[in-house]
Image (cartoon, helix red, strand yellow):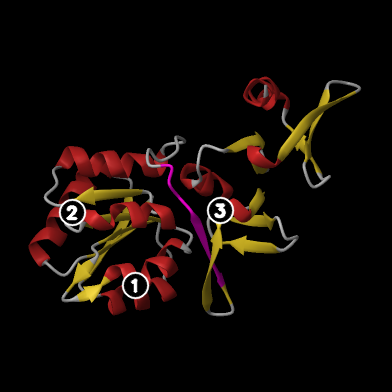
Amino acid sequence: MMKIMIIEDEARIAKRIERMTRNFFEQNILAITICDSLQKGLTYIEKNTIDILLLDLNLNGENGFEILKSMVAGSFHTIIVSAYTDKAIDAFTYGVLDFVPKPFDQTRLSMALRRVTSVEKTTAGTMKYLAVKKAGHTRMIAVKDVLYVKGAGIYSELYLQNGQQELHDKSMEMLEQLLPGSFERIHKSYLISLDQAEKIIIRPGSSYSLLLKNGETLPIGRSRYKELKRKMI
């Protein structure tokens, strides 16, 4: 059951987004909340959990792009609905799931909403930063500095090339949708940047491991061995 937030200052458009969203998810919606300002939206998100944020980038003169970093650090997926199409490329680099340009119709918004439940990666594949929250602040981590991602329940652990670790509020499955194609799921608990892979190690009993360039080894799921081998040739 989805909990959805719409941050849009034009009441007519907000209601249109709400109607189309209800048409798409039908009975699978628990609640839809509409806020007409960034501050109201931020306050609500601090106190409540949501699954999807539909965000406009220009609200009564407020620049929604200013708070995009903190939004994409959340546990939910963010979809931009905006006429500011020149901001689309930048939005994707921060890790939004989709950018729906105004004016839009049911087909285009449904395409974006369908990605929430899809296992496929976003078509943009241009994510360059991962935003993580720590001690009340949002820190931007370059994707190129991520060695691998380990699933930790509803969270993800980011292992960086400098040896540091960071906790991300999104699950590994959600990050898998957003990260570039160079990241490969090698195990139910590991998502690895293939740029950091050295070779596959085959152990007795048909057990497989991946040796990384830094000397670490990670397990490879049996069902993922053949595909990984093909991509590393």
Res. 143 mark: 3
Residue 81, how many percent across, how many down? Answer: 23, 55
Disc number for residue 17: 2
Q: Earlier in the sequence, mark 1 or mark 2?
A: 2
- Depicted 49 relative to depicted 178: above or below: below
Q: Nearer the viewer, mark 2 or mark 3?
A: 3
Determine the secondary structure under disc 1: helix
Q: CA distance from mark 1 to mark 2?
A: 22 Å
What residue would you read off at disc 1?
66
Up the image or down, 74 lies above or below 216; here it is below
Q: Earlier in the sequence, mark 2 or mark 3?
A: 2
The amino acid pointed to by label 3 is: Val
User: How would you rate the neighbour count of disc 3 (Cα within 10 Å): few for under 14, some for 14-19, many for 20 or more?
Assistant: some
Pointer 2 local density, CA inside 10 Å: few below 14, some 14–19, many at least 20: many
Identify the residue shown where x is 36% and y is 75%: 42
Q: Quadrant of residue 7?
A: bottom left
* Image marks 2 and 3: residues in contact by CB distance under 8 Å: no
Q: CA distance from mark 3 to mark 1?
A: 20 Å
Q: Position of residue 107 (x, y in %)?
A: 18, 37
Q: Most extreme residue toward the right, as rendered?
A: 204
Where is residue 222? Give x, y as percent: 73, 25
Q: Position of residue 86 (x, y in %)?
A: 23, 55
Cα–Cα span, label 2 and label 3:
32 Å
Region of the chain picked out in magenta, as a range? 125-133
Are the residues at dot 3 and dot 1 in contact (C-beta closer than 8 Å)? no
In this rendering, position of residue 120 left or right of residue 90: right
